[in-house]
């Protein structure tokens, strides 16, 4: 290294001491000490407040807590998960040096509870002293203040509404007289005008016997319920108070006195019910009848009552219960005050934004606009936003297409559901939050998001509903407009904040090996891979969607600099391909990590056809798998030698993938292989997000401590997991003695089975044995008895008391074994085990016999089965129970069952002699359709019981039609003489058999005739239960017409009738006739026709089909309709038409038949046919070929009927209407069209005729002659076309024939005679046109230069010589812009573009280039050889952000031979990516400077203006920069971070120059709580100044306090201006003990919460008082 160069390092350090912060309580007294302020509590009640401590330092802190409580009314306990050592208040023998001790790790919060329980009527004050080990300055004191009182009447359970933590006004209190918080204060909070708010509280009378009367006063805003009432001794009463104000009103702890008086009653207090004015009574009073004045002047009831009229109506009256009579005791009245605080006011707001216009946004993207609304009122403001769309309906298409200028690349979080959202009413605008509350004098920030899913212009209104506004005012209304654009391609990929949030390390290299600090392209897309562990293949798939209307190809290009020593960690699995229009394709990338670090890889997505290139950054983040044991060490503690111990630890996998693990076998042995630890499993796979147990087994072999260091290897984890296991062996000694009923004690063995026999024990008697367990060892142990429950009854008969317990060493316990049989039984196989914890086990076999009296019951259960619900007259269901005494002695028997309505017996208690039998009769009367189960208990000898179960079922009669559809039986409509029989199955669905009759009583007289309606069977029918079935036959045989009837078929059983089904039917007849049997027609002209009417009438009851024999009508007659159906009472009109074909004077058709279902009808038709009249005149037509000519022929109707004429036309080219109508006595023209399709020769014309057959039988005929001339041009077209633009004119060619035609196309130049070399008019030589259609012929025109060309296009059918032609004129004008070139680049970066030009001529062409944009770099001339192509290249490199769009830039390429080429340039210079971010971290009240740097590219010297958008950061207003060389020059300047609020701060530093552009540097600052500073040494008798700075943006009042009386400050507080320093003078008075020991203290500087942010802020300065030796 050269001598004149040096290597400089900057070394910084920060000294720290362990310290803690008191989070709660947050209020302080005047000394700056935290204050726990309890409310006034009645003696005997308690209140608990939290004490929260947090370690804000950098070192673990041990805190010793001492409770100083002179009155003994405070208790300190740990709460939550706090692991602290707390003194036991009840154990006075075990004294501890501190009330509590706790270790608080860095960033950890511990919680304690301080409980105040007063015992005397007094104010109680205490302290909690907090001492931090190894930091003698951090001795804090928390003041405790509470007060106890006694009173007969108290107000409790006050449910106030407080919007935050109660703040304490330290300026109005002092240390000596701080009063306890008021217990009778109720807060209503913020209230709306005219909106009631009700709160509850309780009034309690603590006197045990005296009753009081209370009465609340009337208040304009407050209403109490109850207002007045009584409160008995020892009782409480819930009350409500409602606040409502019609105008702005504030109540601040306003006292509301309640008058309370002692009262007595005439009766004993126990007979007087509780009363208040809320108690109501309900009465029903008669409603009087209204009186009406009569003409004679008297009043009479408006309604005259009649004997049958109902009794008078009643009216409900609700009255207040009258107050019981009372006597008020003189001089015993008092008032109880309730303090009320409330604020009622209108809501007021301020919103500066009323119009929002979003920038153009691509589909699937989201833009966000932020604005705020301030609450200017005194109460909180509720809001609710609604989005109202304007002129917008949900779009039904999934993809639309934008113009070519509006298709950049897009990005979005997801596109998988956008097609489903469109069409279901999606709204592209959202606002967050959409509802909530803004506190008084606060403001709320709102975000409006625009997320389009289709191309559209959107507009909406954001309407905010705010209640409680003044009359005539409404909430904020914001108008929002936005437009969405279609991208070329969309990546279905979530956006990453890896770059935007400055998570990227600026020291990482850029693409193609760019040096660290290189600014990345702002359009760079980021794909993040999160790898859990190393060596893992991480696959990331996403889709690329092509929303355009054309396909394109793509490719991925890697821009990393390869390292041959290492394989690449990123791999693209889809390097190239193509995407069809409207489709998507999946992309896949793979990442394999090799270490725990962040890896970057740069790629580029390229679409060659569209010249689109999109940069991508692939980021691989590898982290250690979170696979861990639930503990780091485990202790088996003391274990019995030879006994295996089990422990379980949990191996937890908090990742989403499984992991393999294995324990090292070597780690399972202790030192010297003296002990072995067994693990299960040793190796396995742990599933994701689960925990699996690891079982540890250890058997001690010696009485010494062993240690294991287990090592668990996890695959893909870089470090092993360690577990330390400790254990120690010991022995156990125990003796068990058993004492029988004789008092003899026997020692039981743990090596063999011990027998205990109780012998014979009567039922329900108890026999016992005593166990004595003696602990003869030196360790305490626990014991428990376990019973082998192979027979479950044993556990009920055999019990051990107590079943478990603990025995101290050298002591013994007594346990009682009892045997109490509940039934006659034999106790065998009852195994009892006495287990000694970590000791021996004593097996005991217990046996015995239980005996019972010999009483025999004939049955133990009986079922009555299904029985019908009992009714009078039905048979009884009964059973007899026989009880026999087979014992050798008499037995007493008592029935404990009480007879009921459904089960009855008459047995009474008695003694049954030996060998005798008694009978007990039970009768079952089912009352409901349900199952009855009764347990009848018999008590035997008063000791045991015998249960008899009686079961019965009550059921309804369920006899019904098997098929529900036959409940309505339709016999149909029969004719006389017909018979119908139908079978109806009847089924018994009851669970009991049934016998019944079936019958019918018809009401119609026709049905009562014998044999008309019969039902069988007619006798008794018996059906089996549950499915018994019988078929009932119904026969209907009518003898005469019977109208529609409906009759019921009834079931009769035991005098009960029940409908089964309903039958209906009828008997019908019919009669059909014609109005005439002969229809005569007069004379009719040949080929004409005449029509007559014929009517058919059905006067019967049923309809019929009819069918005319049409063949017999032909050829001269026809009838319509030919067939059909005629309903009863209906008429059908027929039209009979006479249309003769041959000449005849007598045409007669007889016997024309109409077939009916009931017979036939006959009809006769007659008429005559006369000759056609002579031709009247000839009609001449003349027109151009394929052109139409129309002539009108007049038709005169002299009759009184409307004529409908069907003309007959002969001739190929004449057409007319097929049907022609002429009104009566009218003349109407008939249009005849002549349209020839071929040209006529001179002596050859087109001929034809037309004949009109008239309805009166006459007719008219005309001869037709037509002439067709040469065609006219189909169209004359004039088009103005820009040159250099290919234009295609569509000529519609017509085929007038029904068959296809082929036309030969000939293009003739008219003006000029020859085409210019640079002009071309082209088309196909032939065109085929299908019959009777048109087909477009494409005529293509292209001109390089401006000119005018006129052509004639002729289409000729070479076979027929028929032709048609068009005349077209093309005028080529000035060329349009050939294309718009869009270039977007960040400032200070160049972008290149290529323009492809072609020379179609046979000579060399020279282009001259000009451009209106100075930032474009290019050559001015381009030469292109004959018949070849070339490329024109230019570059765009801006230095400032700008947009050249309206008007766009212009690039012109001009050639004499090929004319002018125009290109529009849409240029966008976007903001460059931010420079390297700067990170600051400082305590509140301090500052941190750093140096910012950037590279200047301006070609001349310039000055940069620096601005910061956050007042916590400071920078010079102007920085000078030298001219930039080829690579630029570096500019450096200082930035200082001086925070004014706790938390995170973000800012943007902007450096702007007119020539150098704009540079943006993100600034991130973290402001932490002030750290203690010092120590500051103060000598005795002197002072030391300490500099303090007000870092707040406004003048603030600060207070200065010292916590040691040996120190003092010259001034207790001061107002310090913003950003100014202040000198605090601290003095030390000297050591009061006269020694030279150092004295420690703290100077505390504090301010109000509003100045310091959300929490109280304090600055602590450590002080060290030194007394010099003399």
Image (tube, helix red, strand yellow):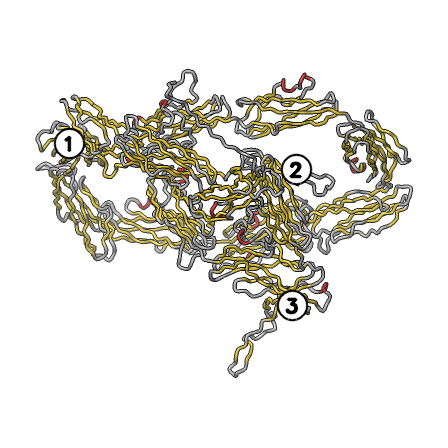
Q: How far apart are marks 2 and 1 (CA)?
A: 114 Å
Which numbered disc covers residue 323?
3
Residue 1374 percent across, percent down from the top left = 15, 35
Is residue 581 visible to the viewer in this orientation of the structure? no
Near mark 3 (Cα within 10 A), the count class, few <14, some 14-19 or many ≥20, is some
Q: Is residue 1465 above or below residue 157?
A: above
Towards the viewer: 393 or 1603? 1603
Marks 2 & 1, CB-CB < 8 Å contact: no
Q: What element carries label 1?
A: strand
Q: Nearer the viewer, mark 3 or mark 1?
A: 3
Q: In which quarter of the image is the C terminus?
A: top right
Which numbered disc covers residue 85?
2
Residue at left offset 25%, top offset 36%: 1444
Q: Is mark 2 on a helix, strand or loop?
A: strand
Sequence-earlier tag: 3 or 1: 3
Sequence-earlier tag: 2 or 3: 2
Residue 265 percent across, percent down from the top left = 70, 68
């Amino acid at each position: 290294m050269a001598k004149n160069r040096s290597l400089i390092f900057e070394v910084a350090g920060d000294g720290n001491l362990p310290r803690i912060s008191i989070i709660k309580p947050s209020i302080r007294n005047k000394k700056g000490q935290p204050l726990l302020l309890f409310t006034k509590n009645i003696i005997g009640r308690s209140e608990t407040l939290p004490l929260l401590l947090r370690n804000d330092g950098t070192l673990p802190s041990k805190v010793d807590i001492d409770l100083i409580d002179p009155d003994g009314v405070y208790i300190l306990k740990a709460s939550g998960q706090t692991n602290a050592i707390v003194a036991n208040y009840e154990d006075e023998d075990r004294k501890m040096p501190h009330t509590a001790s706790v270790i608080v790790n860095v960033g950890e919060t511990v919680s304690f509870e301080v409980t105040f329980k007063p015992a005397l009527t007094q104010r109680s004050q205490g302290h909690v002293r907090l001492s931090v080990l190894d930091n003698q300055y951090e001795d804090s004191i928390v003041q405790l203040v509470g007060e106890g009182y006694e009173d007969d009447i108290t107000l409790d359970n006050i449910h106030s509404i407080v919007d935050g933590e109660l703040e304490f006004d330290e300026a109005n209190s002092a240390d000596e007289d701080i009063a306890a918080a008021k217990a009778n204060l109720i807060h209503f909070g913020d209230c709306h005008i005219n909106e009631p708010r009700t709160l509850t509280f309780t009034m309690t009378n603590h006197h045990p016997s005296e009753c009081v009367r209370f009465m609340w006063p009337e208040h304009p805003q407050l209403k109490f319920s109850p207002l007045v009432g009584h409160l008995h001794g020892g009782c409480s009463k819930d009350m409500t108070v409602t606040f409502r104000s019609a105008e702005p009103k504030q109540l601040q702890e306003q006292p509301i006195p309640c008058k309370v008086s002692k009262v007595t009653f005439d009766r004993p207090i126990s007979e007087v019910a509780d009363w208040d004015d809320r108690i109501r009574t309900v009465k029903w009073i008669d409603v009087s009848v209204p009186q009406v004045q009569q003409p004679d002047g008297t009043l009479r009831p408006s309604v005259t009552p009649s004997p049958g009229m109902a009794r008078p109506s009643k009216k409900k009256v609700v009255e207040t219960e009258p107050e019981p009579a009372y006597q008020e005791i003189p001089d015993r009245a008092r008032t109880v005050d309730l303090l009320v605080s409330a604020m009622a006011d209108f809501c007021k707001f301020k919103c500066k934004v009323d119009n929002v216009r979003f920038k153009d946004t691509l589909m699937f993207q989201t833009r966000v606009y932020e604005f705020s609304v301030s609450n200017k009122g005194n109460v909180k403001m509720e809001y609710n936003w609604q989005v109202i769309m304007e002129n917008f309906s949900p779009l039904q298409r999934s993809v639309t297409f934008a113009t070519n200028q509006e298709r950049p690349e897009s990005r979005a979080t997801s596109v998988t559901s956008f097609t489903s959202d469109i069409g279901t009413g999606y709204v592209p605008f959202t606002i967050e939050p959409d509802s909530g509350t803004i506190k008084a004098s606060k403001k709320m920030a709102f975000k409006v998001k625009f997320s389009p899913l289709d191309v559209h212009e959107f507009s909406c209104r954001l309407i905010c509903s705010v209640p409680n506004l003044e009359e005539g005012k409404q909430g904020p209304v914001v108008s929002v407009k936005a437009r969405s654009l279609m991208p070329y391609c969309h990546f279905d990929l979530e956006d990453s904040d890896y770059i935007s949030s400055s998570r990227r390390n600026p020291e990482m290299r850029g693409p193609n090996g760019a040096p660290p600090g290189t600014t990345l392209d702002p359009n760079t897309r980021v794909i993040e891979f999160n790898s859990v562990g190393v060596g893992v293949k991480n696959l990331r798939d996403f889709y690329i969607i092509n929303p355009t209307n054309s396909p394109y190809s793509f490719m991925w290009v890697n821009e990393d600099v390869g390292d041959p020593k290492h394989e690449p960690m990123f791999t693209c699995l889809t390097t190239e391909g193509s995407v069809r229009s409207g489709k998507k394709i999946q992309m896949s990338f793979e990442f394999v990590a090799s270490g725990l670090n962040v890896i970057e890889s740069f790629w580029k997505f390229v679409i060659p056809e569209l010249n689109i290139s999109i940069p991508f950054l692939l980021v691989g983040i590898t982290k250690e798998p979170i696979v861990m044991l639930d503990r780091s060490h485990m202790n088996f503690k003391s274990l019995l030698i030879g006994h295996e111990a089990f422990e379980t630890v949990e191996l937890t996998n908090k990742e989403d993938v499984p992991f393999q693990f294995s324990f090292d076998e070597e780690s399972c042995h202790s030192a010297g292989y003296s002990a072995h630890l067994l693990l299960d499993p040793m190796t396995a796979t742990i599933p994701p997000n689960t925990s699996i147990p690891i079982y540890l087994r250890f058997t001690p072999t010696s009485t010494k401590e062993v240690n294991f260091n287990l090592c668990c290897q996890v695959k893909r984890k870089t470090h092993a997991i360690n577990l330390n296991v400790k254990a120690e062996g010991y022995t156990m000694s125990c003796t068990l003695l058993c004492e029988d009923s004789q008092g003899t004690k026997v020692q039981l063995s743990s090596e063999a089975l011990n027998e205990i026999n109780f012998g014979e024990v009567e039922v329900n008697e108890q026999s016992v044995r005593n166990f004595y367990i003696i602990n003869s060892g030196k360790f305490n142990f626990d014991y428990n008895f376990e019973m082998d429950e192979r027979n479950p009854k044993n556990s009920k008969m055999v019990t051990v008391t107590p079943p478990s317990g603990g025995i101290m060493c050298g002591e013994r316990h007594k346990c009682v074994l009892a045997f109490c049989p509940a039934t006659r039984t034999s106790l065998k196989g009852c195994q009892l085990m006495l287990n000694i914890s970590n000791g021996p086990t004593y097996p005991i076999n217990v046996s015995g016999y239980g005996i019972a009296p010999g009483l025999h019951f004939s049955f133990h259960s009986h079922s009555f089965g299904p029985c019908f619900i009992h009714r009078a007259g039905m048979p009884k269901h009964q059973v007899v129970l026989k009880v026999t005494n087979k014992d050798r002695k008499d037995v007493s028997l008592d029935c404990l069952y009480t007879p009921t309505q459904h089960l009855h017996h008459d047995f009474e208690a008695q003694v049954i002699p030996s060998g005798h039998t008694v009978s007990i009769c039970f009768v079952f009367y089912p009352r409901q359709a349900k199952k009855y189960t009764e347990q009848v208990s018999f008590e035997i000898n008063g000791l045991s019981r015998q249960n008899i179960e009686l079961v019965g079922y009550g059921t309804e009669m369920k006899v019904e039609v098997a098929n529900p559809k036959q409940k309505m039986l339709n016999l149909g409509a029969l004719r006389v003489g017909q018979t119908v029989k139908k079978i109806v199955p009847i089924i018994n669905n009851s669970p009991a058999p049934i016998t019944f009759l079936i019958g019918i009583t018809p009401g119609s007289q026709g049905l009562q005739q014998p044999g008309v309606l019969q039902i069988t069977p007619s006798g008794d029918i018996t059906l089996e239960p549950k499915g018994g079935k019988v078929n009932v036959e119904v026969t209907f045989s009518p003898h005469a017409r019977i109208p529609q009837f409906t009759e019921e078929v009834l079931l009769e059983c035991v005098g009960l009738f029940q409908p089964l089904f309903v039958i209906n039917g009828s008997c019908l007849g019919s009669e059909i006739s014609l109005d005439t049997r002969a229809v005569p027609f007069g004379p009719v002209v040949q080929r004409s026709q005449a029509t007559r009417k014929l009517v058919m009438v059905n006067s019967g009851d049923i309809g019929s089909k009819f069918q005319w024999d049409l063949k017999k009508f032909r050829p001269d007659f026809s009838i319509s309709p030919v067939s059909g159906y005629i309903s009863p009472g209906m008429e059908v009109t027929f039209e009979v038409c006479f249309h003769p074909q041959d000449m005849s004077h007598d045409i007669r058709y007889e016997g024309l038949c109409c077939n009916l279902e009931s017979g036939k009808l006959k009809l006769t038709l007659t008429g005559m046919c006369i000759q056609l009249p002579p031709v009247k005149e000839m009609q001449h037509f003349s027109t151009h070929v394929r052109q139409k000519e129309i002539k009108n022929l007049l038709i005169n109707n002299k009759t009184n009927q409307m004529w409908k004429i069907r003309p007959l036309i002969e001739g190929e080219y004449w057409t007319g209407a097929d049907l022609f109508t002429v009104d009566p006595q009218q003349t109407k023209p008939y249009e005849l069209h002549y349209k020839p399709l071929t040209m006529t020769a001179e002596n050859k014309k087109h001929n034809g005729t037309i004949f009109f057959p008239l309805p009166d039988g006459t007719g008219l005929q005309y001869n037709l002659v037509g002439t067709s001339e040469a065609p006219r041009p189909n169209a004359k077209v004039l088009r103005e076309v820009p040159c250099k633009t290919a234009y295609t004119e569509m000529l519609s060619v017509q085929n007038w024939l029904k068959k296809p035609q082929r036309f030969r196309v000939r293009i003739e130049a008219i003006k000029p005679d020859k085409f210019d070399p640079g002009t071309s008019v082209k088309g196909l030589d032939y065109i085929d046109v299908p019959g009777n259609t048109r087909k477009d012929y494409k005529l293509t025109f292209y001109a390089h230069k401006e000119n005018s060309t006129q052509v004639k296009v002729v289409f000729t059918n070479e076979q027929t010589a028929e032709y048609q032609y068009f005349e077209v004129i093309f005028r080529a004008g000035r060329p349009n812009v050939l294309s718009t070139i869009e270039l977007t680049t960040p400032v200070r970066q160049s972008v290149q573009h290529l323009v492809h030009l072609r020379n179609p001529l046979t000579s060399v062409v020279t282009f001259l280039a000009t451009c209106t944009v100075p930032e474009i770099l290019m050559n001015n001339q381009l030469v292109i050889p004959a018949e070849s192509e070339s490329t024109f290249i230019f570059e765009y490199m801006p230095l400032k952000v700008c947009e050249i769009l309206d008007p766009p830039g212009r690039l012109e390429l001009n050639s004499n031979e090929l004319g002018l080429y125009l290109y529009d340039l849409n240029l966008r210079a976007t903001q460059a990516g931010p420079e390297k971010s700067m990170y600051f971290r400082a305590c509140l009240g301090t500052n941190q400077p750093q140096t910012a740097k950037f590279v200047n590219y301006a070609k001349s010297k310039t000055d940069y203006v620096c601005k910061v958008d956050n007042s916590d950061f400071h920078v010079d207003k102007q920085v000078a920069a030298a001219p930039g060389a080829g690579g630029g020059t570096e500019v450096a300047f200082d930035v200082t971070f001086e925070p004014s609020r706790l938390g995170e701060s973000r800012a943007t530093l902007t450096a702007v120059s007119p020539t150098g552009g704009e540079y943006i540097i993100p600034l991130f600052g973290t402001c932490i709580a002030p750290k203690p500073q010092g120590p500051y040494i103060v000598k005795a008798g002197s002072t030391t100044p300490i500099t303090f700075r007000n870092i707040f943006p406004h003048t603030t009042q600060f207070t200065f306090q010292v916590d040691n009386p040996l120190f003092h400050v010259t001034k207790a507080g001061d107002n310090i201006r913003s950003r100014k320093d202040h000198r605090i003078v601290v003095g030390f008075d000297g050591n009061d003990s006269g020694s030279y020991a150092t004295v420690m203290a703290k100077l505390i500087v504090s301010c109000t919460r509003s100045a310091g942010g959300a929490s109280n802020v304090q600055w602590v300065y450590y002080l060290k008082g030194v007394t010099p030796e003399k």
